[in-house]
Image: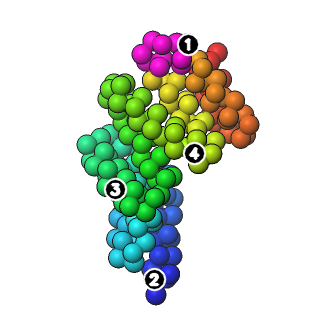
């Protein structure tokens, strides 16, 4: 019984991802909320945390930063209870993005540093590539150009290694 419910939660979460990627925010939110509800009821707290994190990302994309931060806190609390390090890392990175957009560079750097430790421990090079780019953006905005160039260069090296053409192009454009 719980396996079927958990699979349903995964399907709802994946549906939310698809809706989100195509700009259907209302449908994405409904799918993520359903995934979280089903997962929580089934006792699948890891899936619940992932769905809650995705809800936070939707709010962040919509510039509702207060609700996004609340969602990330909720997802992090669940993830801490299950030891779900990838969700913790993603939430820290996502909080950094919000603080960066609010020009709160100190908090952004703090969140990015937290995410970097976790991504390094997980050896998630794809996430590190994005994170290094985020750090480059913050240091550029702070006019600390040497640090910005260093992080953009690290991001470029990883994006080229992983074959991420979008991030490679973004880094090359920034560094040129």
Q: Name which of mark 4 and mark 2 comes first in the sequence.
A: 2
Mark 3 Cα-neighbour bin, 10 Å: few <14, some 14–19, many ≥20: some
Mark 1 Cα-neighbour bin, 10 Å: few <14, some 14–19, many ≥20: few
Q: Which residue is mark 2?
A: 2
Q: Name which of mark 4 and mark 1 comes first in the sequence.
A: 4
Q: Which residue is mark 3?
A: 77
Q: Is residue 148 left or right of residue 138?
A: right
Q: Which residue is mark 4?
A: 121
The magenta stretch is: 139-148
Q: Is residue 133 above or below residue 68?
A: above
Q: Which residue is mark 1?
A: 146
Residue 102, image x, y percentages: 32, 29
Q: Name which of mark 3 and mark 2 comes first in the sequence.
A: 2
Please tell me which residue is depicted at 64% across the width and 23% down the height of the picture: 153
Q: Main secondary structure of the magenta part?
A: helix
Q: Name which of mark 4 and mark 3 comes first in the sequence.
A: 3
| Circle nearer the viewer, 3 or 1 | 3
Name which quarter of the figure residue 109 lies in: top left
Q: Is residue 109 above or below residue 59?
A: above
| Circle nearer the viewer, 4 or 2 | 4
Classify mark 4: helix, strand or loop. helix
Comparing 155 with 22, the one in front is 155
């Amino acid at each position: 019984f719980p396996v079927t419910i958990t699979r349903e939660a995964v399907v709802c979460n994946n549906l939310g991802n698809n809706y989100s990627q195509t700009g259907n925010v209302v449908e994405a939110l409904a799918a993520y909320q359903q995934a979280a509800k089903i997962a929580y009821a089934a006792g699948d707290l890891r899936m619940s945390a992932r769905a809650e994190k995705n809800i936070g990302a939707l709010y962040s994309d919509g510039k509702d930063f207060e609700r996004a931060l609340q969602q990330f806190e909720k997802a992090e609390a669940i993830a801490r209870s299950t030891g779900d390090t990838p969700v913790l890392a993603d939430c820290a990175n996502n909080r950094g993005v919000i603080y960066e957009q609010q020009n709160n560079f100190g908090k952004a750097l703090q969140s990015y540093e937290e995410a970097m430790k976790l991504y390094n421990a997980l050896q998630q090079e794809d996430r590190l590539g994005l994170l290094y780019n985020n750090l480059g953006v913050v240091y550029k905005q702070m006019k600390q150009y040497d640090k910005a160039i260093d992080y953009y260069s690290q991001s470029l090296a990883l994006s080229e290694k992983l074959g991420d053409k979008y991030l490679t192009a973004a880094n090359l454009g920034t560094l040129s």
